[in-house]
Image (spheres, helix red, strand yellow):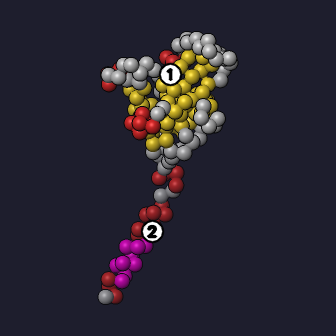
Amino acid sequence: MKNLKIKSFLACLLLTAIVLSCSKDEMQPKSKTLELNFSPLDNSNTRPSSSEVYTLTIKSTAPLAIVSRDLTVIKVTDSQTGKSLDAIIQNKVLQKKLVNSKALRKAIASGRGYAYDGNDCLIYGTITLYDDGSATFTPADTLTQILMNRCGYANVA
């Protein structure tokens, strides 16, 4: 009985030492690599092959910083809440030219992208860039978000 207590005490002591030896920085990942799907803005083409997949590495979430040849992080305003968000958009969308004559300001580019919610998720939706340098993000419908949103990034440095 006494021998069992000593072994239990030593096991607890060893486990405590192991846990305490790991610093908080060592337990948190420094970056995270993932793949994001971007579908065309035209919803009439629903073939799975029409979406494009890009690989990127998230270096930081505060502020959002990524490493990618084909994607860029920009500041956008959520069209529903007015909140400022970091968004991931395709570089080729930044080069598109659109004209929207119904708006006071003109939309110069629009495309699918992801906005980081500041907590844990990349939210899928449409990003519109305007000629005055501003940008808006409109979240996709609920079903699309269920399929396309990516979560699990709260612990990225």
Q: Is residue 97 visible?
A: yes
> Where does the magenta region start and end?
5-13
Residue 49, given in percent of the width and then of the height, sits at: 32, 22
In what element is the residue under mark 1? strand
Residue 89, given in percent of the width and then of the height, sits at: 51, 25
Amino acid type, residue under disc 2 in the picture: Thr
Instruction: Locate the N terminus and report the quarter of the image it occupies.
Output: bottom left
Is residue 59 placed above or below 18 in the rendered structure? above
Q: Quadrant of residue 33?
A: top left
Is residue 112 placed above or below 142 in the rendered structure? above
State the CA–CA distance, disc 2 to disc 1: 51 Å
Dot 1 crowding, Cα within 10 Å, few <14, some 14–19, many 20+ = many
Residue at image position (32%, 83%) is 4
Dot 2 crowding, Cα within 10 Å, few <14, some 14–19, many 20+ = few
Residue 102, given in percent of the width and then of the height, sits at: 62, 15
Residue at image position (62%, 37%) is 81
Please give left or right for residue 44 compared with residue 80 in the image.
Answer: left
Is residue 35 placed above or below 121 in the rendered structure? above
Please give left or right for residue 106 compared with residue 27 in the image.
Answer: right
Residue at image position (34%, 78%) is 7
Amino acid type, residue under disc 1 in the picture: Gly
Is residue 9 in the magenta section? yes
Q: In the displayed image of the protein, which residue is found farthest to the bottom?
A: 1
Please give left or right for residue 89 compared with residue 51 in the image.
Answer: right
Is residue 10 in the magenta section? yes
Residue at mark 2: 16
Residue at mark 1: 111
